Amino acid sequence: MAYNPNEWKDQIVQRPKTYQMTTNDDGSVTLVDSFGLVTELGTPVNADYMNHIEKGITGCAIRYYSTTETFKDKEIALNINEEGNIELWQSLSDDNKNNPLTDDTKWKKAELGTGDKNLGYGRNVGDIFYTSRKDPGSINGAYDCKGIELSEADFEAGETNPYTLLVNNKIEWVTYEAYASEIETNDGVCAKFALDTVNKKFKTPTLKDVYIAAASDNTGECISAGLPNITGSIKLSEEENGNPQGCFYTISTNGDGVSGNSGRFRQTGFDASLSNPIYGSSTTVRPKTVCYRPMVQLANVVDDAIAIETYTNRLQEKTDEGIAQLANASNALRTTQITNCLLEIPQRVNVELNNGTLTLKAGSVVIVPYGVEAPTMSVGDSLNGGEIVDISWDEQKLFYYVKYDIEKQYSYQGTETGDTLISVASTGTITPSFVNKAISGDNPPTSGVNGTVYDTAANIVSQYTSGVQNSTYNSLPFCVVDRQANLISNINNIFNGFGFIGSTIWCDKGVKGLVPNGRNTDGSLKNIGYTLEHLSTYTIQKSGRNDYAYCKFLLHPAGISFTDVQSYFVVERYGEIPFTRAYTTAYVKDENCFYNVGPDLKVIKAELIVTGNFEYDFSTEKAQKIIIQPKIFRALDYNDTSFIAAQGVPSGRFIAMTPVSDSTYTAPGTGYFVAEGVLGQAGRFTSFYNILTTVNNCAFAGRADNYVTNYAPCVKGQQVRFNTDNLAGVTRFGFLYAEGED
């Protein structure tokens, strides 16, 4: 349940020597030691920052007490006592280990509250309050004011025990006899506790149809009901202006009181409401009223195990949530600050390249297209030498996800060179196919084919040699490598989440993202959470084109498709959409929405996620490579300049490659191509020429015994051409990833 913090330590590494090259007047070259062999921090961020984060995460979690655990000063530990109740204990020192909870110099029992020992759930023991809760029995240590009898033993011993507070006169009380007398005298009401010190029992107050008034020194006193005085007057002899006043009124009069023996008589009535309208509005004394349940707080700590378990579980949930936010940050930002992004990409494939040998690591999962009928195999069944661990079936196409627990290796012996798709055959062996020889589509032609064929109508991948099928029910490719003569020189792409074969692109099930969906009333971004439920494929049509294009993946409710980057626009407002250009996709910033312009130039709002870049050759109808691999959103603190700066420096992750002079290499990530060695003669060189930027990085030997180092920075996907006039002297060659690269 708890988070155990890691301890980060600064690692000191040696930075390699670099030299400044000076060309002399006589044509010779002088190499000057630029800064020598120095040491510097090798970690991307320093220990102080990382330990600060660890401390913050640790502070959100509570660990179970154990004598084998080490606790810090003021750290809270959770303990389940012999009765099965849950307790909270506070450590009183650092390095607190092997100390029992009974050691009061090392441990103190923690109480929930605001600092006052008499507080529980924010109330004092003895507090009377009203609630609208209807739960039967006690609620969080509070009991009904119905004369409930309790004992000292019903509560945890100590100065906050309600019985102890009564005995110490911290709460108003009367004897049981006086309590009964007040109940009888005050129509069933006694606002004080009843106390029996002989039997160590007490009763809660009884409050029934009464109202509470503020008091200072007469707490618990019952005050009898009272009403305003009623006044009025009548005159017993009739005369002018002798009408009744106040609460009296005339019922009738007789005689005129003017002549003879006939007088004038008045019958008079009484109505208190004529004096004050509060009279007659009820049958008893009643102010303006709302009704709630009266309760009294008796527990000063939350001693209910269920309540504490609920509390700690919620705390753990918050801790887990916080850790997840540190890793991804998308949960905290997804509805207001980010949009059009991926949140999750299944990571099924793990490959590495060492000394020209490609290894599919144990635990990797490949995807096997298996026709268009409903699945007949289940998770756990064997297929192609592996185990089925998942299934994708959308009522149209079936895909089995096959896991291999033993690593598989592939080495190349041959003279043909070029980018190559790597799959797993139905025999369980790795099978290659040059990218430009792979074919896909509905019922594609196979005559004379030497490579992988994906029949999208049948949903089956097969391997062909000279038009003859060698294997079928193969997997989709899981990576692209660069094959040179008798070796694999580089891994160009790893197909986690997104991939291609022939003219078909695909997106894996389980990819999640945010679709732009307008703005909230406060102007913040509004999104639709999107999850691809089934693997989706899309075959790109030639449509009369013969050019070489850069494209983007599009995710939408129907699955995956694409757009040419030249047909993708980001505009500030709706009016800037290129309405006269068919087949375009535009993101409108102020609306936070995508729009498609159709072939008929109709503009339709679209639910899309636009991500990644790949190259496509329309002349051969084949995808070539993924230039920018789709990635999940990650938050970046722009104030953390040290972290940002560190992302571009060399890391400790190096991929060895085989050097071949006058050969082209593709950067597998953002980082540095490296060539090092003793070239054996002054003036000998190594060089990396960046084909995109046309920058040429050269390193020359000043003496025969000089150890020459050449670093050539590259962005992922860029190509460099390597040359040297002494290949045998190059003893270390490969690619060094930048610190921030995956």
Image (tube, rainbow, N blue to C red):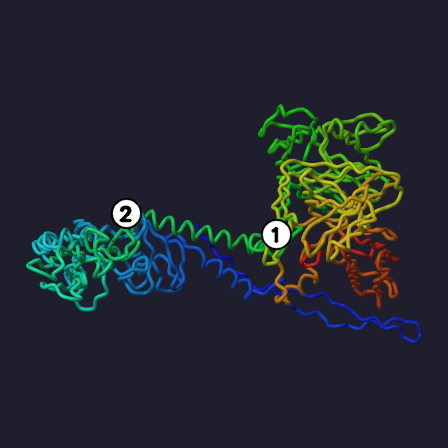
Front one among 239 and 475 = 239
Front one among 13 and 163 = 163
Front one among 469 and 641 = 641
Q: Nearer the viewer, mark 1 or mark 2?
A: 1
Q: Is residue 325 left or right of residue 95?
A: right
Q: Is residue 637 visible?
A: yes
CA neighbours of label 1 inside 10 A, class few (<14), some (14 to 19), many (20+): many
Measuring from the top left, give residue 239's x and y in whole percent. 13, 65
Q: Is residue 707 left or right of residue 275?
A: right
Task: Tell me the amino acid under the disc marked 2.
Answer: Glu
Residue at 65% from the left image edge and 31% from the top image edge: 394
Measuring from the top left, give residue 110's x and y in whole percent. 32, 59
Q: Is residue 110 visible?
A: no
Q: Is residue 422 left or right of residue 159?
A: right
Q: Quadrant of residue 733?
A: bottom right
Measuring from the top left, give residue 155's x and y in whole percent. 22, 53
Structural distance between the alpha carbons of marks 1 and 2: 52 Å
State yes or no: discs 1 and 2 in contact (Cβ < 8 Å). Answer: no
Count the marks: how many? 2
Q: Residue furthest right?
A: 26
Give the numbered dot on residue 526: 1
Looking at the image, residue 710 lies above or below residue 617: below
Q: Is residue 517 left or right of residue 672?
A: left
Front one among 234 and 737 = 234
Q: Residue furthest bottom?
A: 25
Residue linked to disc 2: 82
User: Helix or strand or loop: what does disc 1 sit on?
Assistant: strand
Task: Tell me the amino acid under the disc marked 1.
Answer: Lys
Give the numbered dot on residue 480: none
| Comes first in the chain, label 1 or label 2 | 2
Measuring from the top left, give residue 377's x and y in whole percent. 61, 25
